Amino acid sequence: MGWWQISTDTLASSRFVVSPLAETLASLRTLERAAAAHPRERAWLERWLPDYRRLQADDPLAARIVRAAFTPRWSADFLTPAPVPPPAGQEPDTFERELARVRATPPEVARADLVRSLGRPLPATLDRDDLARRSADVLEWVWTRAVEPEWPARRRVLEADVIARAAQLSRGGWAQALDGMRPGMRWLGESRLQINTYDNPPRELGGARLVFTPVTADVGWVCWDIPYRYGVVYPCTGALADTGRAPVPQALGTLIGPARAGVLVLLASPLTTTQLTALTGQGLGSVGRHLRVLLDAGLVRRRRDGRSVLYFRTPAGDGLVSAAG
């Protein structure tokens, strides 16, 4: 199995970072595999896969580069850089700044990375100097067309996931926060983090910084900028993974209002106010007012989970949603 040896100082300086480039890479991988894990992702894929297929047909070389970069066991390092945490008080990197680092990859580095991902020498068609530029062009297409218009909603969901992970960390330490973050990943103890089940040699992270980055697609990978940063990109889980709003029965929306009905429908599973804000797109104050009304009506209850307060439907709330739907 592959595992990293992580010092106490590295853990103490670890950060959760939202990255528009990572979200775009995850979306590109969804397009490449042409498979979706949840309803929102499936609807997005149905919308954009035909356009992506046309892009591949119009630029077969770029399509071949991307396929070579993403193999089942390895992703080309130049295409998946570890996100850079912003200094305190500063805004995170924009997609443009992150993409610029991909474009600036030296040709010999891009070729070596593709050799490693393929596991064999490059075919003549890929032995060229513009691998990074052509790959970056595809990423820019995915971002501009299919991700950027949804980015505010996606960012809210990713930020809510970070808050949920931070709550897990405060309750159960790193073991609870990291176990199951992505398939094959778990805390082994003795400062060891298993990152996958492959038979790779262990890595000593030393004084490098460790960065955790959520994405809304059901994919994940590890990345690095040795010796400065190592990153783990992981999929959001549960209700947060599906950034689409659950359908609200028309009769229920007429009865209690569509915004409040949307909150009630989502509470089929326990959620915090922060998560509800991310999923509904409503303001925190509006969500709070809806919850107070639903609590007073006996349609939802709440319970404390560490530092978080979770809201969930009562049997009366379940019955109302079922009857209206």
Image (cartoon, rainbow, N blue to C red):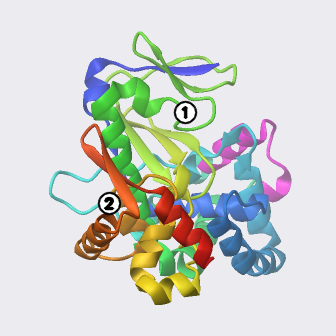
Q: Which residue is mark 1?
A: 180
Q: Give x and y (percent) for residue 286.
A: 27, 76
In magenta stretch: residue 118: yes
Mark sitting on residue 253 = none
Q: Is residue 93 left or right of residue 42?
A: left
- x and y percentages locating residue 42 in the rendered image: 71, 68
Residue at the location (41% across, 64% down)? 299
Estimate how packed mark 2 is, as few (under 14), some (14 to 19) or many (20 or more) residues with alpha carbons within 10 Å: many
Q: Badge 2 is on which residue? A: 274
User: How far across and how far down the image is residue 202, in percent?
Assistant: 55, 17
Residue 18 in view of the camera: no
Task: Name the residue rendered at 70%, 46% in the picture.
Answer: 114
108 relative position to 6: left or right: right
Q: Quadrant of the N terminus?
A: top right
Mark 1 falls on what kind of element? loop
The amino acid marked with disc number 1 is: Gly
| Discs 2/1, front | 2
* SS at badge 2: helix
> Furthest-bottom residue in view?
254
Q: Is residue 145 left or right of residue 90?
A: right
Q: Are marks 2 and 1 in contact (CB under 8 Å)?
A: no
**Residue 244 percent across, percent down from the top left:** 55, 71
Q: Split into 4 quadrants, where in the image is the C terminus?
A: bottom right
Label 1 crowding class (10 Å Cα cut-off): few <14, some 14-19, many 20+? some
Compared with residue 310, is residue 134 higher up or lower down, i.e. above or below?
A: below
- Which residue occupies 34% across, 69% down? 297
Type of residue at label 2?
Thr
Residue drawn 75% across the image and 76% down it = 46
Quadrant of the image occupied by residue 9: top left
The answer for how far apart the CA atoms under marks 2 and 1 are is: 22 Å
Residue 320 makes an appearance in the image: yes
Range of the magenta residues? 110-126
